[in-house]
Amino acid sequence: MSTEHYIPLNQLCTHYEVEMSFFTQLNEFGLIEITTVSETHSIHEDCITEVEKMIRLHRELDLNMEGIDTVFNLLDRIKELQKELNVTKNRLRLYEE
């Protein structure tokens, strides 16, 4: 497994000034996937954008893990509905032309 695309959690804790338990709870709720790389708990760099959103939701809106989970589930549902709407619009265009 390539380690170059993984960021150690201790670096993230220092950078974002959050406790390790925050990441542990995110992992328990299935919001992130913690991977052990070279005996260090890490997350993939592709998850950083979402982790930053989760940290902001926690800090700025004072949301707990359940709230963060709910927000991300709703955002996923919105994305699905937008895709479905685009497919429907494209089909409708075929009939209008």
Image (cartoon, helix red, strand yellow):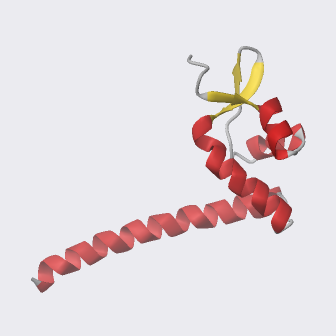
Quick check: 16 left or right of 2?
A: right
The one nearer the camera, 16 or 23, is 16
Q: Quadrant of residue 25?
A: top right
Q: Can residue 6 be seen at all in this image of the molecule?
A: yes
Q: Residue at x 69, y 30 (%)?
A: 7
Q: Indicate whether 15 appears above or below 8.
A: below
Q: Indicate whether 1 appears above or below 92.
A: above
Q: Indicate whether 27 appears above or below 4.
A: below
Quick check: 71 left or right of 82?
A: right
Q: Can residue 63 be seen at all in this image of the molecule?
A: no
Which residue extends farthest bottom?
96
Residue 31 in the image: state x and y as whole percent.
Answer: 69, 48
Of the 4 image quadrants, the one containing the N terminus is top right
The one nearer the camera, 68 or 54, is 54
Q: Indicate whether 14 appears above or below 56.
A: above
Quick check: 34 left or right of 64?
A: left
Count of marks placed on residues: 0
Which residue extends farthest front?
15
Residue 46 in the image: state x and y as whole percent.
Answer: 57, 40
Q: Residue at x 46, y 64 (%)?
A: 80
Q: Residue at x 87, y 45 (%)?
A: 18
Q: Residue at x 79, y 32 (%)?
A: 11
